Image (tube, helix red, strand yellow):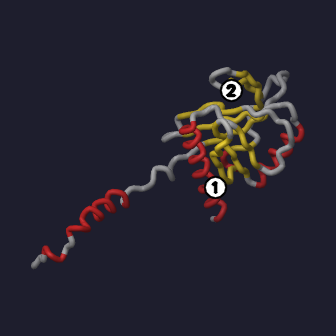
């Protein structure tokens, strides 16, 4: 067997090493998943089917909620981290089914809270009650915007995971 060393361009060796180092790895960002549960505040007199949760870490607020969520990550179409004056917010856009549910609950429950829980991280190990926005009007467009009780990095991870779940849901719907 004859080998010609001159036939191989040594200038391309660093590019080949870079391609092998990065091209063979799968993206970990695509594998990160998140959960979302939106609950409605319930009356304090409901003994069954209710649970009291503590929302916000700095100044905790106890809110009684219905244990069944109104909408979840299964209904997410897209999530976005928004820049707003003084910080950031998260906007979650829901599918048609969740849009109807969100509209019904917000139309019949003004003055109550939507209580939002989320999980994120490598193994969905981070979880907490993220927000409890007050219902001031009917939400008819299927889009929920709120400021989460999370750092910007945590919010980015959570939004990334929600978008990955939305992609998986969309692929499952096409099959």
The spot of residue 96 in percent (x, y) is 78, 55
Of 126 and 81, the residue lying toward us? 81
Q: Alpha-carbon distance for marks 2 and 1?
A: 29 Å
* Quadrant (top left, top right, bottom left, bottom right) of the C terminus: bottom right
SS at badge 2: strand
| Number of other residues with Cα within 10 Å of mark 2, as a class: few under 14, some 14 to 19, many 20 or more | many
Residue 59's quadrant in the figure?
Answer: top right
Residue appearing at x 30%, y 64% in the figure: 15
Which residue position holds label 1?
A: 169
SS assignment at label 1: helix
Task: Choose between 75 and 157: the one closer to the eye.
Answer: 157
Q: Quadrant of residue 105?
A: top right
Which picture quadrant has residue 66?
top right
Judging by the rendered image, the residue that carries numbered circle 2 is: 55
Crowding around mark 1 (Cα neighbors within 10 Å: few <14, some 14 to 19, many 20+) is: some
Judge depth for marks 2 and 1 and give the one in front: 2
Image side of residue 41 versus residue 89, left or right: right
Quadrant occupied by the N terminus? bottom left
- Which label belongs to residue 49? none
* Residue found 81% across the figure and 46% down from its top: 101
Q: Position of residue 128 (x, y in %)?
A: 61, 31
Image x and y of residue 6, in percent? 14, 75
Judge from the rendering whether residue 33 lies leftward or rightward of residue 46; answer left or right.
Answer: left
Left or right, 160 with respect to 43, comes to: left
- Earlier residue among tags 2 and 1: 2
Q: Residue furthest right?
A: 108
Q: Position of residue 46 (x, y in %)?
A: 83, 24
Return the residue found at the far front: 85
Query: Residue at left 87%, top 35%?
Result: 109
């Amino acid at each position: 067997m004859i080998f010609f060393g001159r036939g191989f361009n040594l200038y391309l060796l660093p590019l080949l090493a870079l391609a092998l180092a990065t091209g063979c790895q799968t993206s970990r960002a695509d594998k990160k998943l998140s959960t979302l549960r939106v609950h409605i505040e319930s009356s304090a007199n409901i003994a069954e089917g209710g649970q009291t949760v503590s929302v916000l870490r700095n100044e905790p607020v106890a809110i009684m909620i219905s244990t069944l969520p109104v909408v979840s990550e299964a209904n997410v179409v897209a999530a976005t981290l928004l820049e707003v004056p003084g910080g950031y917010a998260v906007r979650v856009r829901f599918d048609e089914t969740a849009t109807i549910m969100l509209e019904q609950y917000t139309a019949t429950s003004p003055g109550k809270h939507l209580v939002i829980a989320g999980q994120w991280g490598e193994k969905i190990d981070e979880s907490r009650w993220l927000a409890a926005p007050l219902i001031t009007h009917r939400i008819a467009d299927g889009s929920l915007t709120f400021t989460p009780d999370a750092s910007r990095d945590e919010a980015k991870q959570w939004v990334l995971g929600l978008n990955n779940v939305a992609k998986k849901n969309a692929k499952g719907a096409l099959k």
